[in-house]
Every structure is written in C-alpha cells, then in structure tokens.
C-alpha cells in the first residue's frame, strides 16, 4: 500500500502587507531617551518606524495583511484550508490568534495554529505551510507574520525602543508542479536565550545588542551557504536577498561576507524598523512594489532572532 501525498512542490502566489499609519521618527524617540537621529541611523540604520494606534490590535494588523494577500492571490477565503500566524507578541497566550484571524477573514473551519520562533517565525511558518502541502495535509495555506512589539518594549530603554515597530505581512501558499519554495535550514542556540527575552509576563523586553550582533555576523553566513547547497544552487544564482530586518549593519555585514553585491537586498528596516516575524514579508512586498524585485526572481529569505533561532529557504517571487 502506498500512501497518497501532495504535489511535488509549493509556491507563493500572493503577498500582503500592513504598516500602521502612525510613523515615529528618530527625533520623536529622542524626546524620551538620550539619543539622536544621527546616533540611531549610524548604529542601526533606522530613520522611522510604525507604531500601532490605540485600539489597533495585532489581530487587526494580521487580518489586514492576510486580506491583501488573499486579494493578490485571486483566491477566496473559502479556498484556504490552513491559517498559520507567526508571532511572539500575542495579546494573550490562550487562545492563539490564528483562529480569530481566520474567522475575521471569513475562512471557514481551517486548520489554525500560531508559531513562535520570534524573528525567524515567518520562515518557520512558511516551511510548515510548504511541507503540509507537499505531504497532502493542506492545499492552500495563508501564512501571516504579525507583531505589536510596542506592547513589550520599554519606551525609556534606548537599547530596544529605537529598534522595534509594529506591522504584519502575509503570503498565500499553494501546490506547484515544480518546487518554488526550497527546503528550510533551521536551528537554534538556547544557551544564548537570555540575549533577547521577556523575562516574565510582568516585564518588558530586554536585549544584549552586542551579543546578538556578534552572533548574527559570525554564525549566519554559513547558514546561507547551507541553504544554497541544500537547494542545489550557487550564491551567484540568487536575485534577491531578504534577511530579517534586525539592524542595517547586520544586513550589510552579511552582504559583504557572502559577496552578494550583485543582488537586490531588502533594507526595509530604514523606514519600518524591526518588526520581528513580520519583517521578511513586509520587506519582500515593498521590493516587489518598487520594482527592486520582480516575479520569478530567485529569493533567499533568512530569519533570525530570539531563542536564538534561525531559519531560511529559497523561494520564487510571486
């Protein structure tokens, strides 16, 4: 007896993004902490970020991004059979946000679950979606990365308040006759879990920025090479590189270490800040809108952050 499986591959057919309307500049941040526009731009490369407004919940943002991805895909809500939300900032631990997001989008009775791999969450969730489709467990999956980080950041802590913003990005994943989402390379180093953490439910985020910077700039380039090797491509084949938007200096360091000067690189952090699991779909959506990336481009996505977790895969732009 041979068990039935799904299609050979999976692909993204639609992207959606949502950035809150409130834009917070470095000068506004500097009104509360000892910093300046020049200091922030020099150290992390951020000029502005988006903050969710009063009453604008993480679920609201996830629904907005998910709705745009559905519209871009040409599918109706009833066509979706699984909804995955990657987030590390849910408003409460129970229930997960994905069933509510699915209900508000009009998706009837889908499989629904949340993924918390912090800033690597979107890549983890995308892999879950692709694997579910290839195994035959799902046909069409909506993947959303959504964060309301301002709920967990101390506005008086210069090490974190300059970095983080709110937002959501989404992708619709379906089966494909040819693979368009490559195998994931993922991992973690729990010995460094204290580098980025919310110590308890009554505390806010703490971060050892220098420790995270050293880890990212020394450990992630080999991960990228492994992603390419596992998918059978060369670094020179890549058209677009979309790393997690953690820090512009980390992004530029990876580009130099990997020799990716020939590719279009996501640098959405300048205008959106660090949005954790939302950052990769937000950056890729913007690159497609501006023409920096185009349909059919071979794209390398790389998420990394608290845990410390990382995950990445190659994909074809929708």
Image (spheres, rainbow, N blue to C red):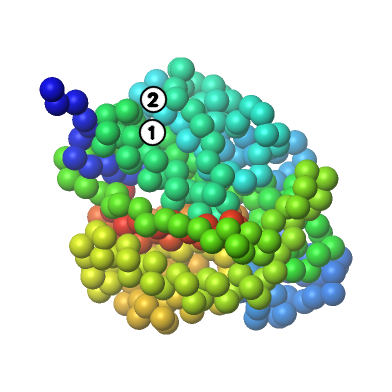
The residue where tag 2 is placed is: 81
The residue under the point 38% across, 33% down is 141
Task: Confirm or deny contact between disc 2 and disc 1 (CB under 8 A).
Answer: yes
Coordinates of residue 251 in the picture (x, y in percent): 50, 72
Displayed quadrant of residue 220? bottom left
The residue under the point 51% across, 26% down is 102
Coordinates of residue 138 in the picture (x, y in percent): 33, 28
- Front residue (pair 111, 245): 111
Can I make out residue 104 in this image?
yes
How many numbered callouts? 2
Instruction: Say what secondary structure mark 1 lies in.
Output: strand
- Front residue (pair 101, 82): 82
Placement of 47 over or under 306, stated as above or below: below
The residue under the point 81% across, 70% down is 30
Neighbourhood count class around disc 2 (C-alpha, 10 Å): few under 14, some 14–19, many 20 upward: some
Q: Return the disc, 2 or 1, that comes first in the chain's sequence.
A: 2
Can I make out residue 71 in this image?
no
The residue where tag 1 is placed is: 141
Judge left or right: residue 172 versus residue 170.
left
Numbered tag placed on residue 259 in the rendering:
none
């Amino acid at each position: 007896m041979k068990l039935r499986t799904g299609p050979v591959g999976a692909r993204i057919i639609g992207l959606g993004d949502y950035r809150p309307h409130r834009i917070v500049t470095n000068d506004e941040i500097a009104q509360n902490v000892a910093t300046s526009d020049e200091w922030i731009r020099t150290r992390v490369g951020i000029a502005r970020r988006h903050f969710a407004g009063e009453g604008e919940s993480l679920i609201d943002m996830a629904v907005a991004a998910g709705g745009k991805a559905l519209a871009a895909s040409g599918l109706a809500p009833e066509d979706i059979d699984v909804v995955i939300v990657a987030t590390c900032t849910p408003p409460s631990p129970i229930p997960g946000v994905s069933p509510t997001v699915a209900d508000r989008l009009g998706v009837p009775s889908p499989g629904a679950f949340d993924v918390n791999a912090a800033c690597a969450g979107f890549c983890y969730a995308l892999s879950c979606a692709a694997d579910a489709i290839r195994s035959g467990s799902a046909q069409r999956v909506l993947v959303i990365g959504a964060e309301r980080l301002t709920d967990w950041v101390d506005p008086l802590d210069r090490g974190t308040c300059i970095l983080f913003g709110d937002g959501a990005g989404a992708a619709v994943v379906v089966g494909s006759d040819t693979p368009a989402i490559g195998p994931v390379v993922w991992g973690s180093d729990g010995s460094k879990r204290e580098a980025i953490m919310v110590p308890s439910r009554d505390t806010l985020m703490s971060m050892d920025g220098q420790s995270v910077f050293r880890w990212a700039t020394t450990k992630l380039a080999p991960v990228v090479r492994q992603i390419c090797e596992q998918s059978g491509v060369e670094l020179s084949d890549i058209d677009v590189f979309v790393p997690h938007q953690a820090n512009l200096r980390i992004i530029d360091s990876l580009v130099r270490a990997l020799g990716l000067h020939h590719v279009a690189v996501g640098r959405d952090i300048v205008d959106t800040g660090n949005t954790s699991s939302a950052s990769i779909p937000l950056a890729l959506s913007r690159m497609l809108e501006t023409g920096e990336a185009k349909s059919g481009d071979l794209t390398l996505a790389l998420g990394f952050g608290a845990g410390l977790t990382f995950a990445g895969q190659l994909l074809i732009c929708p």
